[in-house]
Amino acid sequence: MQGYSINEIANIVKGKLYGSANYLIQYLLIDSRTLFSPQESLFFAITGERHDGHNFIRELYQKGVKNFIVNSLSNQQNEMPEANFILVQDTLNALQLLSAHHRKQFNLPIVGITGSNGKTIVKEWIYQLLALDKNIIRNPKSYNSQVGVPLSIWLLNDHANFGIFEAGISKENEMVLLQHIIRPTIGIFTNIGDAHQENFIDQKQKVREKLKLFTESEIIIYNKDYYLIDDLIQSDKRFENRIFTWSTKFPADLNIIAVKKEQTETLITGKIKSKVFTISIPFTDDASVENSIHCWALMLYLGYEQEVISERIATLNPVAMRLELKAGINNCTLINDYYNSDLDSIRIALDYLVRQTQHNKKTLILSDILQSGTPNQKLYHEVANMLAKKQVDKIIGIGPIISHQAKLFSMQKEFYASTEEFINKLSDLHFRDEAILLKGARTFEFEKISAKLQQKTHNTVLEINLNAIINNLNFFRSLLNPGTKVMAMVKAFSYGSGMYEIANVLQYQKVDYLAVAYTDEGNELRKAGISLPIMVMNPESHGFDQMFENNLEPEIYGFRILHSFLESLKKSGLTNFPIHIKIETGMKRLGFFAEELDELITVLTNNPHITVKSVFTHLAASDKFEHDAFTRLQFSRFYEASNKITKALKYPVMRHILNSSGVERFPEAQYDMVRLGIGLYGISSTKQEKLLHVSTLKTIISQIKKIPAFETIGYGRLGQLKHDSVIAIIPVGYADGLSRRLSNGIGSVIVNGQPAKIIGNICMDMCMIDITEIPAKEGDEVIIFGKENTISQLAQQAGTIPYEILTGISQRVKRIYYHE
């Protein structure tokens, strides 16, 4: 793509240009954290409910960005003499106008996909099926929103001869905007369900809205079994003679007459124009069957021979819907994002790699990029340029094509002809203290490399959904007044979820403060590259020097710790060191009493060694409706005490009182900052439906045994069998964090979607479950807690609270972090 001049863009988006330098724009930027090529980038200062892109213009200018689209001008324009500003009424609309203009420059088939589920899978499978013949541009990952679609369409270039773009909406009138941008020539409507239903009157309204994507399409492919979709399409004259249908029940262009599920594959038999064909897909779930038939229908419409369709569809691969982060050998961090190796997914993964602040060294292991449609030298020159700009320290290339282009890479480099050759040399490579990104085409089997590089642990793992953490953070932010800061609690190993991994995400999401329990936790975060302010809630005198060294801010809750801290500060010669004052208002734990405030104020005002950053207290029962009168009494006590302190000090001091449940229930008490703890991790007293489940503890079945009636199971012979039973042994016990209180039928786990009672006493490293009525085999997955058996449900079974369940997960349980 040759790009557009800034003057051209100003005309396209109908904006007024302030500035004179005529830059050529190649990249569109909406997030200051994903900057790639400053001089060639155009930043859209998009304003949302909880953020304003205008706040990041100065930061981007200092990093070399010179071109901005804004909806208001301020004094900062005068401070940036080399910058161009395009003033528009709506910056999001400007982004969409520019991408719509770009789309019009290309005359090529484009598949537009919408529906409630399956959009990304269908898109990626179509790509797998057609990439042998076509140079395809598609949405990276699931970029299907009002912002994601225009950024995806911008990727169209002169090498492309086919496009596949998915479009998702959450409310009325959004699809019209996306239709103008995508302008699909072929439409696929996957299905209709309850996703994003909250902003529609009913499903009929939602279907009508989604159909707006196809107003100019030459054909719409859909399943007639979804009666509502079929009814609305058939009754709309705009779509007359423009449909290609399939069905398992009704006459259609492709009639599915049999679906036979076997152990590892599904045979699907269909009738097309009186001819019967059977395809085989390497999946057995219903969603994959439906998604594969959409792909089959498209290939038929495009004129592919059935023999070719059958051959290709049999080799469909699972779509990697998530990027995984896990502990690697020798203190490395391993990022698994293999099976997506096009340029755009590489760029997205590199952004994630450079955010791993816990390691100074960044390494990319990259296979040949297959079926890109770009000449090899140009393709790998762009990859090399990308790595240089992202300051990747080392590339390991695997495959004959990338190896042939080795001279293009300027950083430390090694190349291997195959995955096998690389694995054979692995013991000589000495990976240590680095972040390693795996990015490879499926044929290179990078899962073998991952198995060699990841830290070895047993089969019980805790999966943490980082998207859910971000969603929950944004939900709580949506409840806050403008300007209210957020302190995120990452104490106790981030409630069992992992410390620096969670802290890294929160830092990237620009929370204002982190809080840890002890100095050691803060030290570890600093070693991992976390630069946010950190409050230490339980400072100890032997750790003061490390607090000074790492700029950790103590909670001061009594005179003993205050005087001890001041003494250490005097010896160190430090002044104006930040501290946080804890007030006792009813919790009867740590904190200064009201009668101690006069003496406290005297110390605070007469010591230049300290600066009070905040005054706060802790609510005892903000989640309990029956104690609301007491909570409001705490509010009153805190207001009086904090007012007394802040008035006595001659500088601004933040105040904070609300925890997660307090944010949900008492908006009037937000003050300057709130503290988010358990809510970030998906637990709520009143808004559970708004939060996403974050953690899944899972294991596998190690062994299955048939045990006759009246035998006993486990220690103490407490597992008494009343009938012949099938017992599964799973490798998780109380040393992993599975409470012994769940023994003997009190607790249950999920096996193949069904609850299985724990039988007998839970052992240190394993336990036994009853699967008599559940079809299962050795190696099957077992969910201890997750979406189906929630942490709250397990806590209730154990007679405890979710905090204890989460923080009790042992360090020997491997944590796997993923972005969907």
Image (spheres, rainbow, N blue to C red):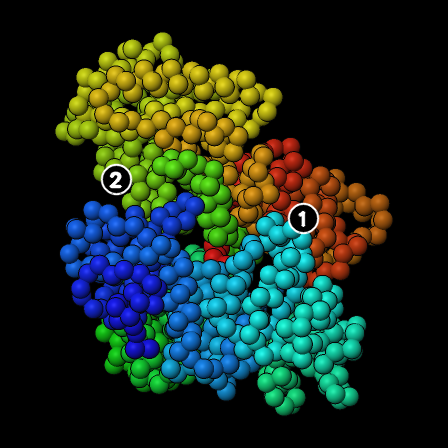
Query: x and y percent of residue 38 in the render?
Result: 25, 63
Q: In this view, does 92 lie above or below 769?
A: below
Q: In this view, does 292 lie above or below 32?
A: below
Residue at the (20%, 68%) spot, across then down: 22
Could you say which is closer to the camera, residue 321 or residue 227?
Answer: 227
Kind of residue at badge 1: Val
Distance from the alpha carbon under mark 1 to that under mark 2: 43 Å
Q: Residues within 10 Å of mark 2 (few under 14, many from 20)?
A: some
Query: x and y percent of residue 9 in the render?
Result: 30, 67
Q: Is residue 604 visible?
A: no
Q: Is residue 638 visible?
A: yes
> Where on the picture, by quarter, is residue 744?
top right
In what element is the residue under mark 1? strand
Number of the label disc, if any, that sits on residue 749:
1
Read off the residue under disc 2. 550
In what element is the residue under mark 2? helix
In the image, is 605 to the left or to the right of 680? left
